[in-house]
Amino acid sequence: MRIERITVFHVRLPLLHPWTTAYGKEDAVETIFVRMETDGLEGWGESSPLASPFYSSEYAGGCFAVLRDQLARQLVGRDIALGEDLEKWLAPFKGNYFAKAALDAAWWDLRARASGMPLYRLLGGQKNTVMAGDDFGIQDSIGELLDLVGAAVATGAPRIKLKYGPGWDTPVLERVRAQYPDVPLHIDCNSAYSLDDMSMFRRLEKFRLTMIEQPLRFDDLNDHARLQREISVPLCLDESITSIERMRQAIELGSCQWVNIKPGRVGGLTNALKIHDLCRSAGIPCWVGGMLESSLGAMLCAALATLENFKYPADLFPFSKFYKEDITTSPLLFSSPWHFTLPEVPGVGTQPDKERMKRATLQEAAVTARS
Ligand code: MG
């Protein structure tokens, strides 16, 4: 497929309610869309690094600039037959995982559309349904959180994830566990702690958590391995896994027993597949995380989540949980409260709605072979 034109969009999606984690509060999600064109076909990708570099070193405004000025120019005019080829052309540029992921996703959608196949099947998925769990940010009060968790448990949520950080920690967990003793539960610390907090981690043993997600520094592997040797609760890495090499090192060190794979964080679906395969051969189960993407990004994540080593409900949600309106033509629709069925159409299964996209776009740039 010869890439003729790449258009990059920096988009702002206002949230219905602020989303608060150990990193701070977001009132809107800033995300990147990429449209890639070849021979009368177009493919769409999304990657959501958020508005400020708090989750990782990337942010939407920076991603937009590096895509426009550097990365897209590297691909236009080239014939790209495999995800590995795209990765090879982008390899001279260090880091910039979320930016690369937007290009990689658009290429996969384009390739699936050109082959007349649903994306999930092209990725190697065997089933077209994906199970999702629920995820709760830091609330204004424990009472509010208990009500939200109660509503999710009442509809059969297969697992609950709580954001966890200083000021919103063990007492909150104590109340949730006391009220809902049987629901599969895990916490996500978003890098808020260090090995100095060992006594707090030891106190978590009694809550029967399925895992503790990213308790320590965003770029650490070694201290996670030390913590995993000290406590029996499985650790899950999120922020720390940005590449196949980092994953190999985490396995060698024993840094985790689970991995949350987000296509954006690892540079795209091509690398997500490699990390999935490496974890499968090492006996480490994975699950698909999210970055509050629109339905387009969520569909990309859902397609990935159909692979066999994704063993825990994904962070997927209907757009109405976070957004007033969906920006795409076909929103992620749940066939039961906690199951999403992927559409049997060529490609990822959705694309931005032109009018809604226009209203949400902060800046846009097209790169062609001549520009
Ligand atoms: Mg996380």
Image (tube, helix red, strand yellow):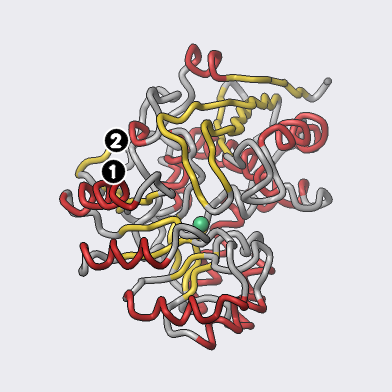
Total marks placed: 2
Mark 1 Cβ and ligand 1 under 8 Å apart: no
Q: Do we see residue 347 in this rendering?
A: no
Residue 85, numbered label: none
Residue drawn at (58%, 33%) of the image: 31
Task: Tell me the amino acid under the disc marked 1.
Answer: Thr
Between residue 233 and residue 331, name the one nearer to us: 233
The residue labelled by disc 1 is 341
Position of residue 167 measured from the top left corner of the image (x, y, whole percent):
49, 58
Position of residue 95 measured from the top left corner of the image (x, y, whole percent):
75, 52
Horizontal side of 145 relative to 211 (left or right) equals left
Residue drawn at (42%, 40%) of the image: 299
Extreme residue toward the left, this view: 154
Position of residue 358 measured from the top left corner of the image (x, y, whole percent):
55, 14
C-alpha gap between disc 1 and disc 2: 7 Å
Report helix, strand or loop for mark 1. strand
The residue labelled by disc 2 is 333
Q: Quadrant of the N terminus?
A: top right
* Mark 1–mark 2 CB contact (< 8 Å): yes
Residue 255 falls in image quadrant: bottom right
Between residue 113 and residue 276, name the one nearer to us: 276
Position of residue 356 measured from the top left corner of the image (x, y, whole percent):
48, 16
Horizontal side of 139 relative to 10 (left or right) equals left
Task: Tell me the amino acid under the disc marked 2.
Answer: Leu
Residue drawn at (35%, 42%) of the image: 317
